[in-house]
Image (tube, rainbow, N blue to C red):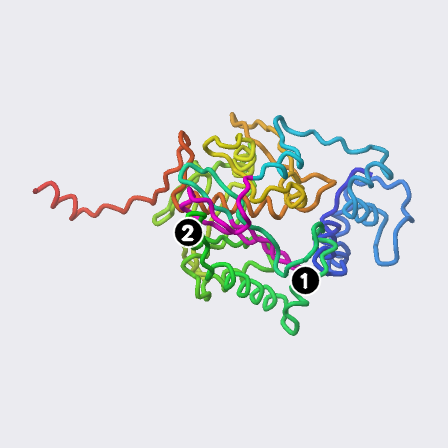
Amino acid sequence: MRSFTWPSMLRFVLVRNDGDGSQATEFYRSNRDVMDAGSNVAWPQRYNEDELSALQHAMNLRLRDEAAFFAEYQNEPIIESVGEEMLTSDAIAAKTNGHLRNVIPQVCNHLTMFIDVQQKVLFWMLCGWEENFTGYIVDYGTWPEQKRDYYTLRDIRSTISRAAPGAGLEGQIYAGLDILTAEKLAATYHRDDGAEMRIDRCLIDANWGQSTDVVYQFCRQSQHAGLLLPSHGRYVGASSIPFSEYRRKRGDRVGLHWRIPNTVGKRQVRHALIDTNYWKTFVHARLSVAMGDPGCLSLFGRDDKTHRLLADHLTAEYRVKSQAQGRTVDEWKLRATRPDNHWLDCLVGCAVGASIQGVSLPGVESRTSQSRPRLKLSSVQRTTRN
């Protein structure tokens, strides 16, 4: 068996988000001829009552535990090829700076936040930044709070649906975003020199299809609308068109592998598009910088055990260098054994938020710009006469 079916992927997504997989099965039923094309199944009768074929059963086994599937069912254990200079979980968890949680280092001038939207829970992170991209993970967590040191998205107990009963899916997400941002964006934070600071920018993940519209609605209606920005991660591989080659339109804002397109349409809310491959490499490079050097990224506290779960999220992906069309790009892949990467997404979002606010790494072109206004003939004639 060498095939892969989209219905099984849909089933995996639905089950992970409290669904039962029936919608994916119906999709498979309607498109089975196309989905089964090219498959070679050794035992056609091997499937469960809620499945339509042995191929669907095999793919569901694969998506439930990919490492076990290849080792036990295919007799081909996964060997993950880790990119060069990849950090370990232990190394990241141990990179603590001694600052108390939620206390901002004196050298920070910017605070950024990112919220990763899942159906069960909202993951969030708060980071402080110096002007040269020296960064500090100040705080992170979930809403609702889990009150456990270690957990996965699959076994989360305290969910949005339980915290906001009586509402539908969109209403639950809206309520969660409202409570979380009211707590964090309205708060006053203190630097260790006593100065007061507030969050400059908060990006919210709007990629998940079932939450996209409600995220835009919330960002438009929130009392903190001026700080909020929906964001969409884009997988820009070696064969993709790089952000630098996109045709810039009037009113677009363009930065370091991110852009904020001019908005025309029903949502009427500006949003950020992010080259996630570039920014995952960027934040891992910051984590690799030695303590005390410019551009270093570190974690609050002194106890590495505090950050064991965070470190697993930050190392849930590995990079593979790919070449195409004269470009060499780090393409990031999710490890089969570590399905949760949500705080990695949060760290990327916080770094992009800092770049939007003007933070830049010395030697790296990061100036933001907008498209030039069109010149009118009358203006040119007046300039010529003068």
Q: Which numbered dot is residue 175?
A: none
- Give the residues in magenta: 97-126
Q: Looking at the image, which residue is at 82% across and 32% down?
A: 76
Q: Residues within 10 Å of mark 1 (few under 14, many from 20)?
A: many
Q: Is residue 53 left or right of residue 98?
A: right
Whether residue 130 is visible to the viewer of this picture, yes or no, is: yes
Residue 373 part of the magenta segment? no
Q: Looking at the image, which residue is at 48% across and 36% down?
A: 242
Whether residue 38 is visible to the viewer of this picture, yes or no, is: no
Q: Quadrant of the C terminus?
A: top left
- CA separation in Å, label 2 and label 1: 36 Å
Type of residue at label 1? Thr
Q: Quadrant of residue 364?
A: top left
Q: Is residue 165 left or right of residue 293?
A: right
Q: Quadrant of the N terminus?
A: top right
Q: Looking at the image, which residue is at 59% across and 66% down?
A: 170
Q: Nearer the viewer, mark 2 or mark 1?
A: 2
Q: Residue furthest front?
A: 193
Q: Which residue is mark 2?
A: 194
Q: Would you place residue 244 above or below residue 163 in this image?
A: above
Q: Is residue 61 left or right of residue 314?
A: right
Determine whether the residue tagged by mark 1 lies in a helix, strand or loop. Answer: loop
Type of residue at label 2? Gly
Q: Residue 259 appears at what percent x and percent y? A: 43, 45
Determine whether the residue tagged by mark 2 lies in a helix, strand or loop. Answer: loop
Q: Which numbered dot is residue 159?
A: 1
Is residue 277 or residue 44 the one in the foreground?
Answer: 277
Q: Quadrant of residue 142?
A: bottom right
Mark before the other along the chain sequence, 2 or 1: 1
